[in-house]
Every structure is written in C-alpha cells, then in structure tokens.
Amino acid sequence: MNRRLLLAMIAGTVAAPRLAYAVPAPPPTLTRLHLFNPHTGETFDGVYRDKSGPIVSAVEDLSHFLRDFHSGKVMEMDVAVIDFLAAVMGAANQQTAMVLSAYRTAETNAMLARTTFGVAEHSQHMYGRAIDVHFGSNLLGAMEAARKMQRGGVGWYPHSGFIHIDSGPVRNWDLDESGLGKFLFGGRSIHFDRHGNLLISEGGRRVPLMVRGGRMLSVRQRMARLHRLARAEFLARRH
C-alpha cells in the first residue's frame, strides 16, 4: 500500500475491501440548474431533465460548460454526477453553484498532480464523473447533505472553499491546511490528531499507528503524510 494507491482509492478508481458503491438513486427534484464558471465567465441556466429523463441537448450543453477549461476539450459528462449536484443543491436550498473544475484531460490532471496536493493520478475528473463546486455561505451544509446521500465520493476542502462530488464509490475525505485531514471508508477513519499522531478509528476506538509528526505545509511534506496514511490504511486492513 502506498500514496498512489490511497490517492486511487480517493479517486474511486480501484476497488478496496468494504469500499461501498453508490446505489441507484431517484432523479433529483431540482431539474433546473444555474451554474457559473469563474474560469471561463460562462453560465448554464436551464432545465436538463424532463419526465422522460435527461434532455440530450441540455446534457450536451452541460458537457461543453463543464469542459476542461485548460485545454478546451469536451467530454460527455456522467448524468449521475449532474444528478448528484442537482440533489445537493436542492437539499442545501442553493439556487446557484460555482463550478471550479469538472472534466480534465489526462494531461491537465497530470499537470495538476505535479503541483497540487490531493490530485489523484486517475481522478474521476478524467472520466467526466466529478465536479468541484462552491456554494457560498452554505458550503458546510451542502457537504453534509452530500455525504448523507451516499451517492458517491465527497471531498471537503474548507480552506480552499469548495467540495468535490463524484459518481464513483462511496467514500469521504477531508483536506485541511496540514494535508489529508481525514479519510473515511467502510466505517473506519484515518487521520492525524492535533499532536501530529496518526490514528485509525473504528467503533469509537482510536489507536495511534505512527509516531508524532510535525507541522507540514509544503507539497512534498503533505505527500509524505499521505504516504504515512497509506501505510496506516494497509495496517488497519490487516486486523
């Protein structure tokens, strides 16, 4: 088990014991979306579903709106992640959402992985199954609503001001200013405490698995922490 594999688990591109897949969910009650992309200045404002299901032309427009803004390339977005977004907006009573990232080409994802902590090598973004989104003042409420739905992956980035949602396996993680704050899977939690000790929690028990660490803020130091988290996840699954 290593950093790359744990990042792949976060991305939802590998199967792991007790890593649940989302069950089919009913279409969201909210079928009209108002979205804004600050990178392109574009908006999408329209109905993407009707009684018969997704509207083909609207999904095409959404896929163009959610394109890789670095390269301009378009990929057909998974309707499941669009439904997930609509469901979260409805549950959080959000009329508008700001989309920060959606589809990414392999080249864009590789570029971001070299410079940004927490970007998985085989991210769901590369398959049109993920959206990074900002909801204004109710971001925390939107994140909590998304996790309760158990419809896919939900990443919480409070210091960067967005949440990640995807239509992959059900898993949650928190990325704080010190690195990966918490990774949740199969009823277990792997995280650092305030002293820098790496803990694995299950059923209320907290067991330290690593010696005390330090305050790590650089990308290299955060990657080192993630490697320790991967080792902890490996040890946890052996028991």
Image (cartoon, rainbow, N blue to C red):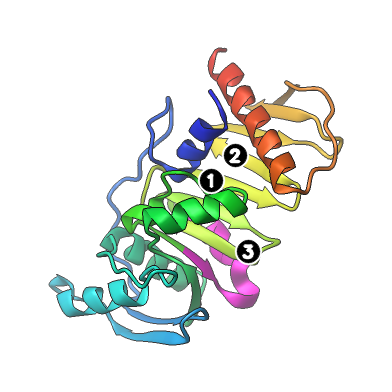
Q: Which residues are magenta?
A: 132-148
Query: Does the magenta run of residues contain 8?
Result: no
Residue 194, disc = none
How would you classify the magenta stretch by its main secondary structure? helix
Observer-nearest residue: 236 or 104?
104
Distance from Cα at disc 1 to Cα at disc 3: 14 Å
Describe the element under mark 1 as helix, strand or loop.
strand
Check residue 140 in the rendering and tell me which mark sits there, or answer none.
Answer: 3
Q: Looking at the picture, how far across and down is residue 200, in whole percent?
A: 67, 27
Q: Is residue 67 left or right of residue 215?
A: left
Residue 222 x %, y %: 70, 42
Query: Which mark's residue is nearer the viewer, 3 or 2?
Result: 2
Q: Residue at x 41, y 42 (%)?
A: 12
> Does the magenta-highlighted stretch encompass residue 139?
yes
Residue 183: give its label: 2
Instruction: Name which residue lies at 61% across and 53% down.
Output: 115
